[in-house]
Image (cartoon, helix red, strand yellow):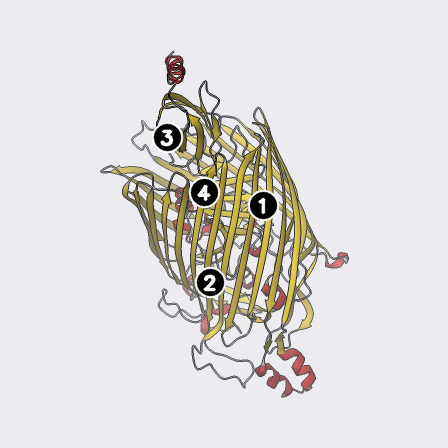
Amino acid sequence: MIHRITSILCMLVGAVATAQTCDLQWHGQIVDQRTQEPLIHAHIEILDKPQTSYTDFEGYFTLKQLCEGSCQVRITAGNGQEFIRVVEINDAPKPVLYVALRQQELDEVVVKSENRLNNTQHTKKVKANYIAQEYNGSLAGSLEKLPGVQAMQVGSGMAKPMLRGLGLNRIAVSENGINQADQQWGADHGLAIDALAVDQVEIIKGVAALEYGSDAIGGVLKIDHYKVPSESGITGSFTGMAKSVNQALGGSLQLNYKHKGFFAKATYSQMDYADFAVPADSLTYLNFRLPIDQRRLKNTAGVDRNIHTQLGYSGKRFVSRLNISRVYQKAGFFPGAHGIPSVERVKDGGNRRDIDYPYQRVTHFKLSNNTTYFVEDQKTLKIDLSYQNNHRQEFSRFHTHYGNQEAPAVNPNLELDFSLKTYDAKLKWQQQWLTKNELKLGVEGRYQTNDSGGYNFFLPDYNSSTWGAFLLNEFRITDKSLLQLGMRYDWGHTQIKSYFDEYLYNFLTNSQYTPEEAQTYAQRSPDFSKNFDSFNVMLGFATRYQDWELRANLGTNFRWPTAIELGANGIHHGSFRHEQGNTQLDPEKGYVADVQISFKRPSWEVAVNPYVYYFANYLFLNPTKVFSILPHAGQLYQYTQSEAILSGFEASYTHRFHEQWSSLLVLEYMHNQQRTGNAGRDYPLPFTPANSVYTELTYSFSKESKLAGMQIGLNARLAAKQKRIAQAELTTPGYQILGLLISKDFKIEQLTNKLSLRVSNLFNQKYYQHTSFYRQIDIPEQARNIQLTWSIAF
């Protein structure tokens, strides 16, 4: 009755206001009151009036030709929930409308499954509180229990993300719209992003290369710092953390400030950790048996110090953010894995926090600006600009295999030094047209330079430039059916500089090689340049019928050969071998088909996601039958390419029952194979994760209980034996490990607190992960870890 009266009043006001021109404009934003997140693709309409609009990806909308007065507004969120608001239309209508969405998913994990489909891709989002609760030292490790996500463990605080067994340069990591550039080709260092500073991570699997370019074959980790402080004035939070496995101590402090349209955020994180414990007394490397004193892996201590700041302004017609971040890490390498094995080098030095040789030091500086202009109704222009400087150094006491090489006068123990500078610019136009279509047009460019140094040669100096343009169009057949078509063209240029090794030349001429032979081998890197281009298309379809949902994508993908694959030629102790590039490599090209079928009821949901990749020329490092010409280098590994097929599926099941109980089950299966034309050499692809099952059971105490706000959870991961291995890889036994989580939410003088106790590898079991950096030298995963986390918001 009230709604009808209000509507009649609106009509009367419009009828009698003959002097009005009805040319007012309302540019506003819809925000979820509980999460403070903008509502994307929400429908806004003035009841009994023709004006309607949809919110964009920032939650903003524009309504035009409005008459002054009080009117009724209906908001329909993407999940079908409706809200009615009475709004006063005047020269300055209310800029933000808050709605209270009913909680239908876990607070920490949001699966895109709204009644109104938004895209054809299968995505998952995790919030900052989820990452803090699951944090185990790295961002990649914090996401491992999500379907299709794996972590390539490197050490105490380092891990590289993998999607469906594809990692390194086969997944894109996008932070604030800009792809991360931090020497991701290396398996011996982690991701230079502070996990405790991010607002949200979105995992996009399948056909994602069109918008994110090369490297997005396996998918995208989309990291955002877009959350605007919800309250005016100063707010903040603090997270403290302690771990038993490596005696880690650290935390993260975040401060926010907001005044009208201006806002600022700053986060500082620090973690200091000692040598980590393993459930083993010895290891075997190159047929040497080495002891592990006190079950602590010597020289794996480290320190992380990270800072991220953001300054922004949110106006009626645009939103702009300036991001400045610096990620710093210094971490030791286990000395038994560098050079010739030695019992003396792995003996306990007495100080578990000492970082001795060999060690690595990484500093990643990033400056970026993200600006979105709201040009007209349902038309936006987004501009992303970025500068990145990744400085990676490996230190090892000076040693030489030549005999005639002297230590450098400056930094004599600096073995490898890489300085990678990256400049990015992206422009994206987004608009709705012909009512049911949404168009995205984008262009982007990137320029990189890499300077190498150190007393050991591995990677030459190089520079590269890439340009790309893409078009994506979404056609909304109905609110529950969506068709997506896209295409992209890319052009790239790589210039590798020449490097002649005089020390190697003198060594070879003194070792009975002819001058001509010595000249050939000593030319470690030729002066080389090459152009690449690629055209790709994709087609996606999504539909929902009652409780069923189908998402299907089919498309092509590509990846540029990296400078390491084209021009590397040296011993890299971090990967335990002599790696040699190949200037004849072509861009990696392939096809991918991805289907997700899900069935959802109010208390449970099941989803199955099969996929298949075909690569016409998969790039990989192949052990040759030739021994390296370099002294003490052993077998030569060279980059090559061949046909390959990668297939598998992910299945997940979530269930809430008896109000307090919730469960999760995730299955992952992968199968891949090279297709060289020689059946005897059709090995599986390297670094393929073992098939696994993850399960979790959680009990939440009711609000009426004395333990309200408390959760207790038990989890288990079971991995099969990985016997489908690439050439020169080791088989990895299967394992079963258990974990425990206890958390409690509480308030102290109106301040929200959360205390969490997490136990990993509960029974201190010795086990191996096939994708671990240390697997090939027989080092097991970390011992039992008890982690205590305390978070407080103020």
Expressed as whole percent of the image width and height from the top left, the position of residue 749 reads 22, 38
Q: Earlier in the sequence, mark 3 or mark 4?
A: 3
Kindly report the distance in space between the C-alpha atoms of the residues bearing marks 3 and 1.
32 Å
Kindly report the distance in space between the C-alpha atoms of the residues bearing marks 3 and 2.
41 Å
Going by the numbered disc 3, the residue's amino acid type is: Tyr
How many C-alpha atoms fall within 10 Å of the one at disc 4: few (<14), some, or many (≥20)? some
Q: Which residue is mark 4?
A: 373
Q: Earlier in the sequence, mark 1 or mark 2?
A: 1
Name of the residue lying farthest toward the front: 19
Going by the numbered disc 1, the residue's amino acid type is: Ala
Which mark, residue 445? none
Tag 1 near tag 4, CB within 8 Å: no
Kindly report the distance in space between the C-alpha atoms of the residues bearing marks 1 and 4.
24 Å
Q: Is residue 403 above or below residue 221?
A: below
Going by the numbered disc 4, the residue's amino acid type is: Tyr
Kindly report the distance in space between the C-alpha atoms of the residues bearing marks 1 and 2.
25 Å
At 67% across and 79% down in the image, what residue appears? 520
Q: Which residue is mark 2?
A: 390
At 24% across and 37% down in the image, what residue appears? 750
Q: Which residue is mark 3?
A: 98
In which quadrant will I find the N terminus? Answer: top left
Residue 96 appears in view: yes
Going by the numbered disc 2, the residue's amino acid type is: Asn
Q: Which residue is mark 1?
A: 208
Tag 1 near tag 2, CB within 8 Å: no
How many C-alpha atoms fall within 10 Å of the one at disc 2: few (<14), some, or many (≥20)? many
2 or 4: mark nearer the eye: 4
Q: Earlier in the sequence, mark 3 or mark 2?
A: 3
In which quadrant will I find the C terminus? Answer: top left
Secondary structure under tag 3 reads: strand
Name of the residue lying farthest toward the top: 1
